[in-house]
Amino acid sequence: MEKKALTGRLYDVQGFSVQDGPGVRTTAFLKGCPLRCPWCHSPESQAFYKQLSWMSMRCLGVQACKERCIKACPKGALEYGEIRADAASGGSLQLIHVKRDLCGNCGKCAESCYAEALSICGKDYTVEELVGRLLQDKKFYERSGGGVTISGGEALCQPEFTIAVLRRLKEEGVHTALDTTGYAKWDVLKETLPFTDLYLYDLKHMDSEKHQAVVGVPNEQILDNARRLAGENKKLQIRIPVIPMFNHDEQNIRATAGFCRELGEAVEVVQLLPYHNLGVMKYLRISDKPVAEATPPDDAYMRRLKMIMEEYGLPVTIH
């Protein structure tokens, strides 16, 4: 019997990325994450299963498509929703509503939607299919000192696939980065060491109880893995999302800075990532549940946090 090819599930592949490591990069975003950060700017990354996404601003109205999506759904999960004014015609558009409790994410409605207001988030790739796509941009990596970043979600939720992709990229001479929450068994993370040049490493809160209360998991494993990576002489870019009412207070920032200083020369840079609410609309595309929002920290406050961390001798940027 022929062995089935190893596959992974992604929700996006983004070329010309300049935010996910050095140079011009292509970032592969894998689905699935054990954390549930309320501020997540990519909520479609959290679940491993494929999800129906509905972008209301693209919807032409059921009049235009003659209810193609409603008729295509085998479970009756689409119904008439709100009515929106149509600036182009001066009339109105009858939109749809997705009954999420009935939707099986089969994608039949998306196949019928020529406006692409409905789409399925999640696509399966074999290792060679993804590597082939990533190598299309190799000339840009070589000219800019860039490479490929494997991100998520949490890429280590699909460990065999992630490691296989990293291995193949190194065989092709591509610089690799792994963007991770650090929430994985060390035995899994250790397998990435020979094939990963740089780790983009998230630190969300130094208090484990608060960490678990808000994002759903404790932080001991995350901190221990960071220490182990530093002990293996791996390079780290520490990423700290600055979230109001969670981790933006001076006490936590100083505790985080002290921990980063302990990691020594492994830390290439600490990146402060101010909270933004750009993910709110993404939540509304895949869910009817209420979305938590906060007021983004202003520039002056971010500069103050940067100065505090620099007191610990750390190279710090506001990302």
Image: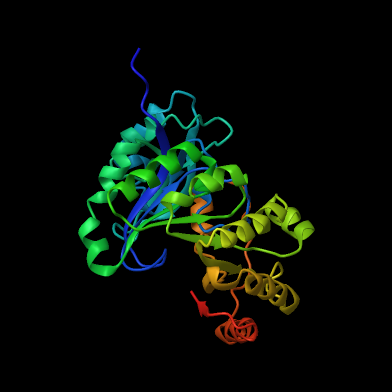
Q: In the figure, 75 relative to 19: above or below? A: above
Coloring scheme used: rainbow
Q: Nearer the viewer, residue 163 or 58?
A: 163
Q: Position of residue 156 (x, y in %)?
A: 52, 45
Q: Is any part of residue 150 visible from this angle?
A: yes
Q: Position of residue 291 (x, y in %)?
A: 61, 56
Q: Position of residue 83 (x, y in %)?
A: 45, 49
Which residue shows up at 31% across the image and 65% down it? Answer: 24
Which residue shows up at 44% across the image and 50% down it? Answer: 194
Q: Quadrant of the N terminus?
A: top left
Is 171 situated left or right of 318 in this image?
left
Which residue shows up at 69% across the image and 64% down it? Answer: 205
Q: Position of residue 200 (x, y in %)?
A: 50, 61
Q: Nearer the viewer, residue 271 or 119?
A: 271
Q: In the figure, 314 relative to 19: above or below? A: below
Q: In the figure, 263 relative to 176: above or below? A: below
Q: Nearer the viewer, residue 61 or 195?
A: 195
Give residue 108's quadrant in the image.
Answer: top left
